[in-house]
Amino acid sequence: MTEGQASGAPPLNAHKLAVARLWAVERHPYLASALFAIQPLAKPGLGGAAVDESWRLYVDPAVVEEWSVGVLGSLLVHHTGHLLRDHAGRAQRLGVARDTSKDWALAADAEINDDLVGTGLRLLDPVLPQTLGWNPGRMAEEYFHCGHRDTELEPDCGSGADGVRRPWELMRGDGGGLPPGERRLIACQVASQVLGHSREGRGRMANSWVRWAEELLEPKVDWRKALGAELRKGVGAVSGRVDYTYRRPSRRASVSGDVVLPALERPVPDLAVVCDTSGSMSEAQLGRVLVEVDGLLRSLGLARTRVRVLAADAAVHTVQKVANAGQLRLVGGGGTDMGAGIEAAVRLRPRPSIVVVLTDGMTPWPANPPKGVQVVVGLIDAGEARGGRPWAAPAWARVVHIGSAA
């Protein structure tokens, strides 16, 4: 995260902000990717801090000097909650306008702060559902439609919380900020970390964070069994083959005299996963890619060091060996050519025996299958091509249709 200035503003205390980020990460490690992605900008006279939809944090240099590290760290966690939970997008879908943004701000703050009570939150005068006459543990949409007790609290967390742009905010293309593709990838990575943190039982975590992560990532239909069945077929076919090797002596060597006989071996399947990170993949689809890779790593029974993941759109951007989906960096956002991903996977050493391609299908495919490699294609939310024909995988691949994100 790079501390910056806006419109010739005095610089922020970069050291204090860095310490505040570390304070926040220590208490909420599953939010680390998002906490380090926020970009602070100095905004004198603001009197506090606010975020925009491009993940820029506007903060008054005076309050950075005045507030403690704990208050600054809590502020970062609070605003990260607005961004990850897409409060701006949810407000726009709900029809929140400038005249109703104050009510939405109270509702959104109540949703976030309710989760952070008891986790070391040190916000000044935090909005809590109980103080407004609301039941805890509900969503901002429900709070928005409920009447509340009179309060002098008027939080202004910026357009990143309600989708209403402030006059002092930079335009989307100015002064840095994160593009939509990077924002959704970070959200998917954080969701995977949240689920991992929850499953391992490391510390306290609010149920609403787990619910958010599950809604973003977890599959809604039982197509994983079909995908697992196809993979087990491929693994069984490969591991069932036997081949000759001279790397170890044959059991008949003692009776063969001077003739060197080969031994039989059963190969161990080697798996590579090609993830489609092109611009046509939506946030929900990228989330499902993360879930499926995580499921593959946990359930296939292969050695974890043998599973390699390639992020590809029209070209391959990263090749990673991962033990869980939270370690993935799904880089991309351009055009699509899964043939390039398959070709790169086949060139890996050691050469994989099975290549899994997770894609929406909006891609050209090689005319012929790669030699000596089984390909399994998971078509995620496959739509329709121009002319009304459905996108499809090649006839030479095993295909599993993964259900609608809706």
Image (spheres, rainbow, N blue to C red):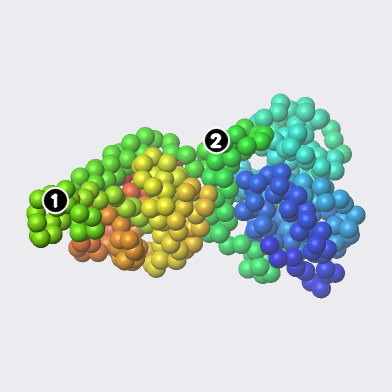
Residue occupied by mark 2: 199
Q: Amino acid at mark 2?
A: Arg
Q: Position of residue 55 (x, y in %)?
A: 66, 57
Q: Position of residue 166 (x, y in %)?
A: 74, 58
Q: Amino acid at mark 1?
A: Ser
Residue closest to the eye, 182 or 405: 182
Task: Tell me how many marks there are.
Answer: 2
Compared to 138, does 283 lie above or below?
below
> What residue do we see at 41% from left, 62% from top?
312
Residue closest to the eye, 156 or 102: 156
> What residue do we see at 40% from left, 56% from top?
308
Which element type, helix, strand or loop, lies under badge 2?
helix
Q: Position of residue 158 (x, y in %)?
A: 73, 53
Q: Quadrant of residue 336?
A: bottom left
Q: Position of residue 47 (x, y in %)?
A: 86, 55
Give the Cα distance between marks 2 and 1. Answer: 54 Å
> What residue do we see at 67% from left, 30% from top?
137
**Residue sticking out furthest to the bottom:** 8
Residue occupied by mark 1: 254
Mark 1 neighbour density, 10 Å: few (under 14) some (14–19) many (20 or more): few
Circles 2 and 1, Cβ within 8 Å, touching? The answer is no
Left or right: residue 331 compared with residue 206? left
Left or right: residue 93 compared with residue 382? right
- Say whether residue 155 is visible: yes
Residue closest to the eye, 367 or 329: 329
Q: Quadrant of residue 93?
A: top right
